[in-house]
Image (spheres, helix red, strand yellow):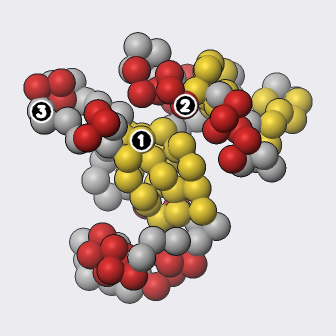
Amino acid sequence: VIKHKLWGYYAVVVGWDEYCKAPESWIAQMHKPPSGGDVQPWRTMPNYSLMVLPRPGDEKKPQRPGGQDVRYVPQVNMELLTGPRAELDPSLGALQEYFSSFYADCGWYQPHPWLQSIYPDDIVECGGQKTEL
């Protein structure tokens, strides 16, 4: 679970790339820092697919197709939340589509097998044991 450093929303990581793999037209439009600085480093650092979490009152807003708000964000714009701060409301339907359980002591979610198979080398150390995500 992360908090976006610039925009303040909370999200769950549901995928990642070693570097930005979006089309150039998307990068030019979406990777604009508010200060107008250089975004070139954003292209070469890990970028993450994030499922944005709803805020109170969001249920009244129009939903995106499929009901999920998924964004692609460079690593530098993310603050990692750990431990109990990362626990989310388990009733969030979209969360259940990606993850089966939450481990509060480590602050991470166990992905369903289909998601784990996409990232087979991802490992988390939790409670002194290494666990495949």
Residue that lies at the very extreme toward the right in this rendered image: 129
The three-letter amino acid code for the residue at tag 3 is Lys
Circle 2 SS class? helix
Disc 3 versus disc 1: distance between alpha carbons?
A: 17 Å
Q: In the image, which is nearer the foreground, mark 2 or mark 1?
A: 2
Whole-percent x, y for residue 4 in the image: 38, 51
Circle 1 SS class? strand
Residue where numbered disc 1 is placed: 51
Q: Is residue 24 above or below residue 90?
A: below
Asked whether the residues under the numbered discs 2 and 1 touch, taking CB atoms below 8 Å apart as contact, a structural biologist would say yes
Asked whether residue 33 is in view, the answer is no
Residue where numbered disc 2 is placed: 98
- The residue shown at (32%, 80%) is 25
Asked whether the residues under the numbered discs 3 and 2 touch, taking CB atoms below 8 Å apart as contact, a structural biologist would say no
The three-letter amino acid code for the residue at tag 1 is Met
Dot 3 or dot 1: first in sequence order is: 1
- The residue shown at (57%, 49%) is 15
Q: Which mark is residue 39?
A: none
Q: Is residue 113 above or below residue 44?
A: above
- The residue shown at (62%, 19%) is 101
The quarter of the picture where the C terminus appears is top right
Dot 2 or dot 1: first in sequence order is: 1
Whole-percent x, y for residue 19 in the image: 58, 71
Residue where numbered disc 3 is placed: 61
Circle 3 SS class? loop
- The residue shown at (18%, 29%) is 58
Classed neighbour count for the residue bearing mark 1: other residues with Cα under 10 Å, few (<14), some (14–19), many (≥20): many
Is 117 on the left or on the right of 49, as rendered? right
